[in-house]
Every structure is written in C-alpha cells, then in structure tokens.
Amino acid sequence: MYSFIRDIREDLLGLLYPEGVKCCLCGDEIWEGHRHGICNSCISGIEFIRDRYCSRCGKLLEKGDICRDCRSFFHYFDRAYSLCVYEGKVKEWIYAFKYGNRPVIARSFGKMMADRVKQLGIRDVFDCIVPVPLHRKKLRQRGYNQAALLGRVLAVELNKKFLSSTLLRVEDTPPLSGLTRHRRTEVLEKAFEINNCFPEGIKNVLLIDDIYTTGATVSQCAKILKKYGAKRVYVFTFASGRSVD
Ligand SMILES: [Zn+2]
Ligand SMILES: [Zn+2]
C-alpha cells in the first residue's frame, strides 16, 4: 500500500517536475519554474532590461530617454529592444551558443525573448519574423545560424510567419568587433541583399539577432528590408551592450 501511494506521489511529481529537466546553461537539475529551461541560479546571473532603456535602441539607460549613441547617429530600424545586458555570464553563454555547438540554448533564449515581446505589448506591431542572416560559408562552419534558431522559436511562440531566407548575407564580412562605427557601416554596405521573392503583403518586420552592439548590422538589414517594401522594422536581440548616457 505504502509503495502504491509512493508511486502515485512520484508520478504526480513527475508530471509537475519531469525528470531529466536540466538547465541548458549549467546542466544542474531544475525543480521549479523551468518554462525557459534555465535554473534560478543562472537566471540570477542575467541583468534584464525592464524599465530604464533607450526609447530607440533599447539599451539599458541610467538616465534620460535616448542614449548618446541614438542622439548622434541615425538607425534605419524604427525601434530596437533587448532582453538583457551583454555582460558577465551572458557573454559566456552567447559564446557557447554561437561557437560551442549548443543550438539547444535557442529554445530557452527564444522563449524568454517571446515572453518579453508579450510583456512589451508589441506582439501585434509586426507581421513576420526575419533573422539576421549568416553568410553560407559561416553557416557551413558553424552548422546553424543562431539568429535563425532564435527567430524560429519566437515565431512559434508568438504565432507569426517566419521568413528564414528573405534576407541574404551575400558578403562574408570580417568580425566587426574592434572596428569603428564608420568602418562597420562601410564593411556592411553591400553585405545584405533581399531574396528575389520578397513576400507580398508583408509590411512590418521583427528582425532578430543575438547581440546588439552599435546597431550597424541591424540598421543595414533594416535599410535593405525597407528598400524592398517593408514599412516598419523592429529589432529584438537577446542582449545589448551597456549604453553611454
Ligand atoms: Zn543553470
Ligand atoms: Zn539608444
């Protein structure tokens, strides 16, 4: 009898907390709140961007409404948002996600991003989701495009069209880190093109990437999308660098 009750109890626990649920970042078992597949300890290592952020690029802001960057430079996208600050553990995790052959992280990050889109109340301002594309050479090396994986999860969670091959990266650009803003813009000038079948009726796009640094990449993508018919381009990245006020 005792063992029967114990079995039932364990079955119920199994339903609530299925066995084998491990944090996708540190590998520890998760016992509660595992909708995103990330343990509480890892969650506490994330600095979420919630209240104070730049009303153009979405970077965390200490004071004011628009960061210095956005006061000085034009972006082709209409508005950008990020889930968290690109610092500390977040940097390590994004590195592992991009270069450590751990595409499974997309499921957790993408779900968190989708929940944030709902919280922000911007779900209805776009018709489709487009990822920042990777050049085919890099795609072959890496095996997947991390932005496309995130975008796919967001599209499923938010019930939106996912346009994975509308935007193409036609030039294999060098790494942008370390380049000045001006140089980044130059390097990216001819990097993106539109696939010759830009879907009719698509007006507003949510462009997805993993990191927002100066915004040069997403701005260039937005420029091309708008050239071919997109009316508004919103950007959502998993993380962004700290702003300069
Ligand atoms: Zn963890
Ligand atoms: Zn800004």
Image (tube, helix red, strand yellow):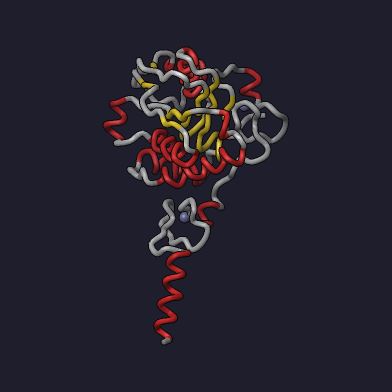
Is 226 left, or right, of 166 in this rendering?
right
Expressed as whole percent of the image width and height from the top left, the position of residue 2 reads 43, 86
Q: Is residue 225 above or below residue 18?
A: above
Q: Is residue 22 above or below residue 208?
A: below
Quadrant holding the C terminus: top right
Residue at the farthest front position = 201
Quadrant assignment, res 66: top right
Report how many numbered discs are placed on residues in the image. Answer: 0
Q: Which residue corresponds to the image point at 42% horizontal and 43% vertical from the top-left?
A: 106
Quadrant holding the N terminus: bottom left
Quadrant assignment, res 155: top left
Q: Is residue 74 above or below residue 2?
A: above
Which quadrant of the picture is home to ligand 2?
Answer: top right
Residue 175 seen anywhere in this rendered image of the structure:
yes
Residue 180 seen anywhere in this rendered image of the structure:
no
Expressed as whole percent of the image width and height from the top left, the position of residue 159 reads 47, 37
Residue at the farthest right position = 64
Q: Which residue corresponds to the image point at 46% horizontal and 26% vertical from the top-left?
A: 178
Q: Which residue corresponds to the image point at 39% horizontal and 42% vertical from the top-left?
A: 97
- Between residue 202 and residue 130, name the one nearer to us: 202
Q: Is residue 164 above or below residue 10?
A: above
